[in-house]
């Protein structure tokens, strides 16, 4: 399994289990199936509403005495309603309590957007805090405290553009160590990738398979299905792999992590075996031509011009 290395030498599997939209006993079984299959990287977030279930699964696995806490890299994320002063550490502690852990391996600011405390999803402009009311650097300083206090071994961000990363780095004491963003052959984000590499910021791809199971309200009528792209099907056939495996392997060949979500045991195992898929330079060149800057998660649901959130990705 390829790994990504942090500046202090810590490593993270390049293939992890994504858990967005996964809940209940189905998720609990998926966590166990994944760990037993060899996964050592689990990704969740406060907003997913599934940290407690994941915590139960992990506690049961660790109690068996064969796999230990230090063997598994666990990521969670700060929700948008806990950005203001004094709110980050309590939110992190709540995540730790639900996950039944003493620390996170990685804690991320989920979005560069702030809500009033207790707002899960904004329904009106007054549900937002402007970035003057809750500056990202002030949120980040609390993230830095979480690292200094040992509550999170590593800290980073999610859904941050180059512009937002540059601004944050110019003011931060500790540089973000990770940026988790939507990445796949239709949204290759080469400028972001190059910038993050130049700043030693690791990249994790969410929705690496296109997130086809998200709610219909988040889907475009004519959105592309990456599983049906001829070039990818041809490469998969040539490499004796599946299209999802090619998609995941593509990230690993670019030096990025990917967190495909699944609750189906066969798919969980198949995704993990993407680590064995070797893509050739010619494959990478063909895939490079697929880029069309298409976002499955367009961020429009958080855009509120009156509060200064008009262009979340700065595009």
Image: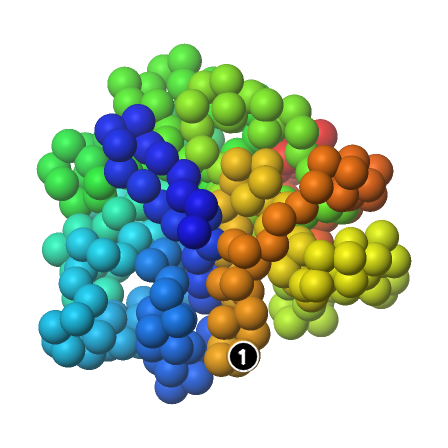
Task: Name the foreground residue: 180 vs 301.
Answer: 180
- Local SS, label 1: helix
What residue is rendered at 24% in x and 29% in y? 8
Q: Position of residue 104 (x, y in %)?
A: 24, 50
Furthest toward the top, the residue is 170
What is the basis of the colouring in this image? rainbow
Quadrant where the C terminus lies? top right
Q: Is residue 67 toward the left or the right of residue 28 in the image?
A: left
Q: Is residue 262 above or below residue 167?
A: below
The image quadrant of residue 202 is: top left
Numbered-mark total: 1
What residue is rendered at 59% in x and 40% in y? 253
Q: Is residue 54 above or below residue 204?
A: below
Does the image show residue 137? yes
Q: Position of residue 289 (x, y in %)?
A: 83, 38
Task: Name the foreground residue: 115 vs 313.
Answer: 313
- Residue highlighted by disc 1: 266
Q: Is residue 314 above or below residue 61?
A: above
What residue is rendered at 78% in x and 62% in y? 237
Q: Position of residue 121 (x, y in %)?
A: 50, 59
Q: Position of residue 87 (x, y in %)?
A: 25, 45
Q: Is residue 133 toward the left or the right of residue 127 in the image?
A: left
């Amino acid at each position: 399994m390829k790994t990504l290395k942090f500046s202090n030498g810590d490593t993270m599997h390049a293939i992890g289990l994504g858990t967005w939209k996964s809940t209940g006993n189905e998720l609990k079984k998926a966590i166990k199936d994944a760990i037993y299959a060899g996964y050592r990287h689990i990704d969740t977030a406060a907003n997913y509403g599934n940290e407690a279930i994941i915590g139960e699964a992990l506690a049961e696995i660790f109690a068996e005495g064969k796999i230990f806490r230090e063997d598994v890299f666990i990521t969670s994320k700060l929700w948008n309603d806990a950005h203001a002063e004094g709110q980050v550490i309590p939110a992190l502690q709540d995540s730790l309590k639900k996950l039944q852990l003493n620390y996170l391996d990685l804690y991320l600011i989920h979005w560069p957007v702030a809500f009033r405390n207790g707002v899960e999803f904004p329904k009106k402009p007054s549900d937002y805090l402007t970035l003057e009311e809750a500056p990202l650097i002030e949120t980040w300083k609390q993230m830095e405290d979480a690292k200094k206090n040992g509550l999170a071994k590593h800290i980073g961000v999610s859904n941050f553009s180059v512009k937002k990363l540059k601004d944050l780095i110019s003011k931060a004491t500790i540089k973000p160590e990770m940026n988790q963003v939507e990445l796949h052959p239709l949204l290759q984000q080469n400028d972001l990738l190059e910038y993050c590499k130049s700043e030693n910021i690791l990249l994790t791809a969410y929705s690496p398979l296109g997130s086809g199971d998200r709610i219909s309200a988040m889907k475009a009528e004519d959105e592309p299905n990456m599983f049906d792209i001829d070039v990818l099907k041809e490469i998969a056939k040539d490499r004796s792999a599946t299209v999802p495996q090619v998609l995941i392997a593509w990230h690993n060949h670019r030096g990025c992590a990917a967190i495909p979500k699944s609750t189906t045991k066969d798919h969980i195992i198949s995704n993990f075996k993407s680590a064995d898929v070797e893509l050739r330079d010619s494959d990478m060149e063909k895939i490079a031509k697929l880029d069309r800057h298409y976002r499955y998660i367009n961020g429009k649901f958080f855009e509120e011009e009156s509060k200064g959130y008009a262009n979340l990705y700065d595009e």
